[in-house]
Amino acid sequence: MNRHMIEYDLSSRGAHGVKIGKTGNGIGVVAHEDLGYNVLRREFGLDGEDQVAHWRPAFKATKAYAKKSMAKVIKYVKTGNESAFNLPSNVDKINQGVVDKGKGFSKEIAPFVK
């Protein structure tokens, strides 16, 4: 493939202003790693990557934890008995500083929670 064809191909895919130098390197081009694709490559062993399951076991564990937790929430809603949660006795009250630290996160994530 010659330089002009590569430049045209990149331009038609949205990488405008790309020039291929005589060395074959792109000039004025910045490449960004596709993290989502790389995660999937590793998770499922695509494109020659060794398969290392990370997210599937994490999601499975989260599902099991959520199921167990929701059973406790339902028990609490039905009975009002806080012991459903097996809370430790030495839990302190949360202070205002900790609440304030969480406000920034809440503000950023709130538009996406419906």
Image (cartoon, rainbow, N blue to C red):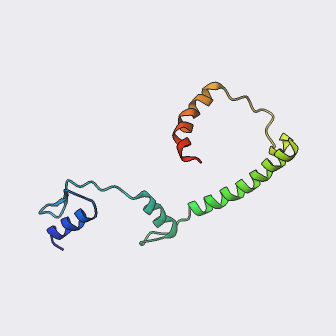
**Label tally:** 0
Between 4 and 50, the one lying in front of the other is: 4
Say whether residue 99 is left or right of residue 25.
Answer: right
- 69 w.r.t. 99: above or below: below
- Quadrant of the image occupied by residue 34: bottom left
Image quarter in which the N terminus is found: bottom left
Q: Residue at x 25, y 65 (%)?
A: 12
Name the residue located 48 percent from the left edge and 69 percent from the top edge: 50
- Return the residue nearer the eye: 8 or 90: 8
Q: Nearer the viewer, residue 114 or 74?
A: 114
Residue 66 at what x, y percent from top left? Answer: 71, 54
Question: Most extreme residue toward the bottom, as rendered?
Answer: 1
Name the image quarter holding residue 98: top right
Left or right: 17 with respect to 42?
A: left
Left or right of 111, for residue 5: left
Identity of the residue drawn at 71% across and 54% down: 65
Location of residue 58 with respect to 83 vertically, above or below: below
Residue 33 image offset from top left, x and y in percent: 37, 57
